[in-house]
Amino acid sequence: MPTAIPHRLLPNPRAAGRDAEYGAAQRAVLNRTAFAEARDEITRWPGYTPTPLVALPGLARDLGVAAVWYKDESGRFGLGSFKALGGAYAVFRLLAREIAARTGDRVTSADLVAGRHRELVAGLTVTCATDGNHGRSVAWGARTFGCRCVIYIHETVSEGRRAAIEAFGAEVVRTPGNYDDSVRRAAGDAAANGWFVVSDTSYEGYLDVPRDVMQGYALMADEAMAQLPGGERPTHCFVQAGVGGLAAAICGHFWERWGAARPSFVVVEPEKAACLFASAEAGRPTVFPGALDTIMAGLACGEVSLIAWQVLDPGADAFMTIPDDGAVAAMRALAAGTPPVVAGESGVGGLAGLMAAAADPEARRRLGLDANSRVLLFGSEGDTDPALYADLVGRPASAVRDAA
Ligand SMILES: Cc1ncc(COP(=O)(O)O)c(C=O)c1O
């Protein structure tokens, strides 16, 4: 029997049910047409290659399920996380809209990479606040497509993460206070200077850019569908969430493509930053109070993204919370597995949720998790903070990879 991990599990009281159609409210967020555009652009970017879908039969055996598949995003465009798909795609879309508005020309990302409208683009500035991964993606997109970029990081973002963003040519500004303070500073400076905010979360009046971000993420789900052996379908999918953009992109894509045959979808959050869980309990978007001081920095969010909620409120089958220790246990299980997998603390929430549920007979029953279950996970980051990785796992990522 796997080790017990304390958790909370809430079957979604508002779940639309297996047979519910992927409706107009969901299509307004993510849909086939917008996805086809995102796929056509992103798959032509320099360095594009699908990330691997890794089968983990040993882990499946230990957890008492038939199969575990892990989509390993650590190598995505050399940026270390799935975020490479979203922020950079939103940068492209924003530049394309701006060029169309100013010149009437409709450009592709290949046009921008080739230097079309170089001068116009160089005069545009994109900006965002970040605790690491999203800012890296926006900075990389800005460099790839030729615009200027200013990224705001708050007090506790590590110097390593700062350097990774600067390496893509962005100007990085460290602001006093927490993440929310850096968001306000980015918005204020953008308004004062005529810059464009590229945020990965949506709120009233700011929906288009985060929609593009999420549409980019959906490519990951699409790749996984094509990579599953012999066209097999997972029965369950556990995905970690911060504001919910990643989870909603995957949930929406499977719902639209597979309909009633989609996997049962479980959203997993840190117990110290569970805004989706709180919203599901309350039946509406609800702020999660407190310091949000989880080691899962990418998931440390107190407010849901409104458009993500539009998909997950009816589309998720259950919400879970897990402790920081659960994430560490999941990182170690992956590092010790066959093959060994390097995964960062914000990338393993889904696995931690599966481990917690698998060890709890009541949770297994409520989720319909049994010896026939085939579970799909999205490992959303590698060792994006290498020092923290070595500290939590007990050896550096290089030693884990060498054991392969
Ligand atoms: C590695 C990683 N995984 C998952 C997430 C969660 O994504 P979202 O905030 O869209 O729920 C983040 C967000 O920063 C992240 O960095």
Image (tube, grey):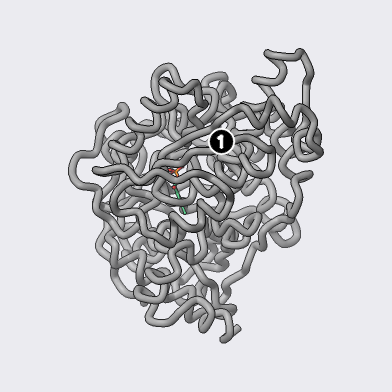
Q: Is mark 1 within 8 Å of ligand 1?
A: yes
Quadrant where the image shows the N terminus: bottom left
Return the residue nearer the eye: 219 or 373. Answer: 219
Q: Position of residue 348 (x, y in %)?
A: 44, 61
136, above or below 208, in the image: below
Return the residue nearer the eye: 23 or 385. Answer: 385
Residue 232 lies in quadrant: bottom right
Return the residue nearer the eye: 272 or 313. Answer: 272
**From where the camera sits, is residue 318 visible?**
no
Q: Position of residue 200 (x, y in %)?
A: 47, 36
Return the residue nearer the eye: 145 or 257. Answer: 145
Residue at 32% x, 30% y is 184
Is 334 positioned to the left or the right of 145 in the image?
left
Q: Position of residue 146 (x, y in %)?
A: 67, 38
Residue at label 1? 213
Residue at 48% x, 29% y is 197
371, above or below 82, in the image: below
325, above or below 262, in the image: below
Q: Residues within 10 Å of mark 1 (few under 14, many from 20)?
A: many
Quadrant where the image shows the C terminus: bottom right
Residue at 52% x, 37% y is 18
Is 293 positioned to the left or the right of 60 in the image?
left
**From where the camera sits, is residue 78 visible?**
yes
Q: Position of residue 399 (x, y in %)?
A: 51, 84
Count of marks, rendered view? 1
Residue 350 lies in quadrant: bottom left
View extreme (bottom): residue: 403
Residue 328 lies in quadrant: bottom left
Residue at 46% x, 23% y is 193
- Callout 1 secondary element: helix
Question: Mark 1 belongs to which amino acid?
Answer: Val
